[in-house]
Image (cartoon, rainbow, N blue to C red):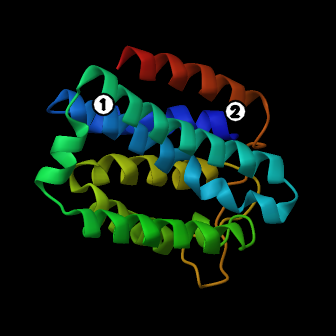
Amino acid sequence: MLGRTHFFIGITTALAIFEPSSLPILVAGTGAAAMGGILPDIDAGTSGASRETEKIIGVCTAAVSLIILADYFFHIGIYQSLMSRSSTSRVIAGIAAFLLLCVIGRRTHHRSFMHSFAAMILFCLCVNVIFPQITCYFAAGYLSHLLTDLLNRQWELLLWPSKRGFSLKMFRSDGVVNWLMFVAFMCTSVYL
């Protein structure tokens, strides 16, 4: 599936499974789910799709920026919620580890490390260090990406470092099914 489809599938999955208990968790959780939904494709640069990778980095940056701006201008309380259960050094360490994983993932082959349960667990650990309350939203977005990509014709190494790939070989990643899923999940995420 394409990035915009993963974006909305991640949001819809997280919002359908988890009921945000507050406005800060709703806003931050939705952003985390969107990021988790598209982050695995940061490795697309090694497969000749570097423009997609740049879009993913841009969307992730925009999502974080919008969350920060919403919290600043509308006093949603994300910063207070974050700092009430964490420290600045812990947040910085989590962000540094998260970015390091992104750099490593960017240098791997498409649908290898970044499309594995190992990567999902490592990224979730980083998110848990940064903002524990939204880890489940991020995980739901990431897992939705891995499961949705199983429908594609290209293998993904879910059990990396094992070289055994998995694919149901049902659809092309950029075909009609992708478009239908994009529309359906976009409408559903807006509804939720």
Q: Residue furthest right?
A: 48
The residue wearing badge 1 is 71
Q: In which image quadrant can residue 150 be found?
A: bottom right
Q: How many marks?
A: 2
Classify 182 as above or below 109.
above
Is the C-beta separation of discs 1 and 2 under 8 Å? no
Mark 2 nearby-residue class (10 Å; few <14, some 14–19, many ≥20): many
Say which residue appears at 47% left-offset and 50% top-offset. 36
Which numbered circle lies on residue 172? none
Residue topped by disc 2 = 178
| Separation of marks 1 and 2 at Cα, in angstroms | 33 Å
From the top left corner, tell me how far across and down residue 96 is, in percent: 45, 70
**Outermost residue toward the bottom?**
162
Q: Determine the residue located farthest toward the left in the rendered image.
A: 84
Residue 12 picture quarter: top left
Percent of width and height locating residue 76: 23, 27
